[in-house]
Image (spheres, helix red, strand yellow):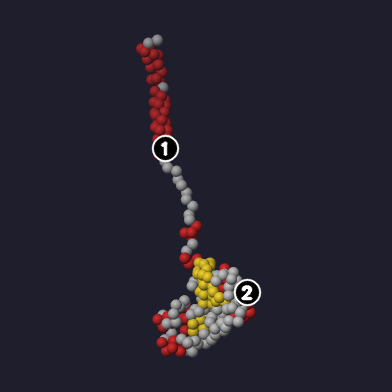
Amino acid sequence: MDIEELINRYLPLARRHWLPLVLGITGLILLGYGLIGLFASSSDSKDIIFEKADSRESSSPSASLVVDVEGAVVSPGVYNLPKDSRVKDALIASGGVSAQGDRLWVAKNLNLALKIIDGAKIYIPFEGEKQSSPAVSGSTGGSSTVGIGESININSASEKELDALPGVGPVTAQKIIDNRPYQTLQELVSKKVVSSKVFDNIKDKVTLY
């Protein structure tokens, strides 16, 4: 059978069904282009990598504090503690009161529940040692242990304790608390918490630690 006979045989059939044939051929062409584009995009795509965030980035400087624990403790030194730590936490970090420590003094004078602030210092006296300065320098307010001296720690004393100072009333006592911490006693004047006259009257009765 030659080409002319094939044309004569199938041409009438093609004329009757030309639309389905055209649509079918067009569909096959579009399908081919679609498959080519799909494989091309798959080969060029890059893997998406999910990286775990560094947990250290979630820790802000304000989430911890540094405290200096000295005196009759097992391991004196500077310790990093979580924010809102108490005196008890600092003692635990330093190993607790040593065998030479004055445990009776600690039981009577040291407030283990006292909150400490960044840069605070805690001193535990030895047995027989006269403790004339505050045991804890640094708190967030409230009642604190001042020690066996008469000096009042302006960084940790309560409003009632500050109110007892000459020339300092409830309003000024609260101002002293609001402007903590203090690096020097003179900051009471430079921060305009008290007047120079009042400062002269209380400077020998207050301390920073």
Residue 81 seen: yes
Image point (47%, 64%), residue name: 60
> Distance of mark 1 from mark 2, alpha carbons?
73 Å
Element class at badge 1: helix
The residue where tag 2 is placed is: 99
- In the picture, measured across the screen, residue 104 lies left or right of residue 119, that is right
Residue 46 position in % (x across, y down): 42, 42
Residue 117 seen: no
Label 1 environment density (alpha carbons within 10 Å; few <14, some 14–19, many ≥20): few
Residue 150 position in % (x across, y down): 53, 86
Q: Nearer the viewer, residue 79 or 32?
A: 79
- Amino acid at circle 1: Ser
The residue where tag 1 is placed is: 43
Residue 95 position in % (x across, y down): 59, 69
Image point (42%, 80%), residue name: 187
Q: Nearer the viewer, residue 19 or 36?
A: 36
The answer to which quarter of the image holds residue 39 is top left
